[in-house]
Amino acid sequence: MSSVLRYRESCLEAQKRLEAAGVEEAALEARLLLEHVCGCERSELYLNPERELSAEEAKRFLELLGKRERRIPLQQLTGKAFFYGLEFAVNGDVLIPRSDTEILVEEAEKCLSGGENILDLCTGSGCILLSLLSRGKGLSGTGTDLSEKALAVAGENAKRLAPAAAFLQGDLFGALPESRKKSFDLIVSNPPYIASGEIPSLMPEVAEHEPLSALDGGEDGLAFYRRIAMEAGAWLKDGGRIFLEIGCDQAADVCALLEENGFAEVRVRKDYAQLDRVVCGRAEI
């Protein structure tokens, strides 16, 4: 790039560099990086294509571009991700919210009439729990996670989106006091579900830059589902519901685990690509 950077040429050159680095949506990400650094809207880039970047903006843009070329995720560079119409703070300590996970929120939201108590296991950034709490009145919720660093991110998001949310550090249900048994109307979770041996083959953004603890589901990817299915009934009210995000080839196994542990009305919800994405069930009354 030239010593003086302008909007249009910066975007075009950045796009070329990102394409060469193997970034799939290079044009979009080049623009988003530029908007982030310059604090401008998309319209300004189009209306003022010859606008020069300040020396500080140019330095910061080239710095972030170099990091994106090394396949550090865009959301980690900008510090934010959008999910279910809300903006979430993210960093390398949490899994970046994906649009696929919105299917889980959509399904769980159908069960909200007001006043429900929600438990979110492996909460990460808190995107599932906070999205649900933002959609109804009188809702309460608790998120648990083994990672204290992840919970710090969730707590920051809660301050903006749902201050009443509570977050507890611990291993799944182990974070909760015994007094909370049979107190939840809904359990939701996007647990780690990638088989350990498959992780090295994932995109570099995921395999190298997102927390391993949020990805690794054990030898067959089902380790967390076994534990959740076995223990969830003790924490749900009679007739309470459970919603689990799954890998697209795990529906039969996860359905069987819920049924084996006494859940009724077990079913699968597909995502918009028609891939199995969420398994739901009801605790027996």
Image (cartoon, rainbow, N blue to C red):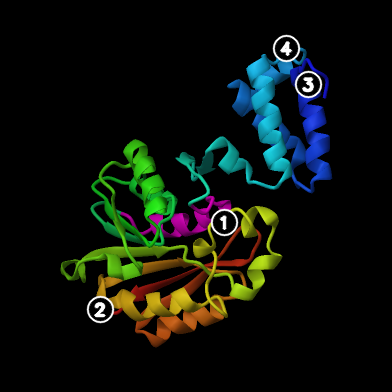
* Residue 245 showing in the rendered view: yes
- Rendered-image quadrant of the N terminus: top right
Q: CA distance from mark 2 to mark 4?
A: 65 Å
Splitting the image into 4 quarters, where does residue 120 fall? bottom left
Element at label 3:
helix
Which residue is pictured at 59% across the width and 60% down the height?
271
Q: Is residue 277 magenta?
A: no
Residue closest to the eye, 140 or 22: 22
Numbered label attached to residue 51: 4
Q: Amino acid at mark 2?
A: Ile
Element at label 4:
loop
Disc on the earlier residue, 2 or 4: 4
Please state which of the two labelled residues, at mark 4 or mark 1, is closer to the viewer.
4
Write down the region rendered in magenta. 94-112
Task: Judge from the rendering whether residue 183 lies leftward or rightward of residue 272; answer left or right.
Answer: left
- Rendered-image quadrant of the C terminus: bottom left
From the image, tell me which residue sits under label 3.
8
Splitting the image into 4 quarters, where does residue 220 fall? bottom right
Task: Judge from the rendering whether residue 234 lies leftward or rightward of residue 70; answer left or right.
Answer: left
Residue 168: % across, % down: 29, 57
> Do labels 3 and 2 touch, CB within 8 Å?
no
Q: Amino acid at mark 4?
A: Arg
From the image, tell me which residue sits under label 2.
285
From the image, tell me which residue sits under label 1.
100
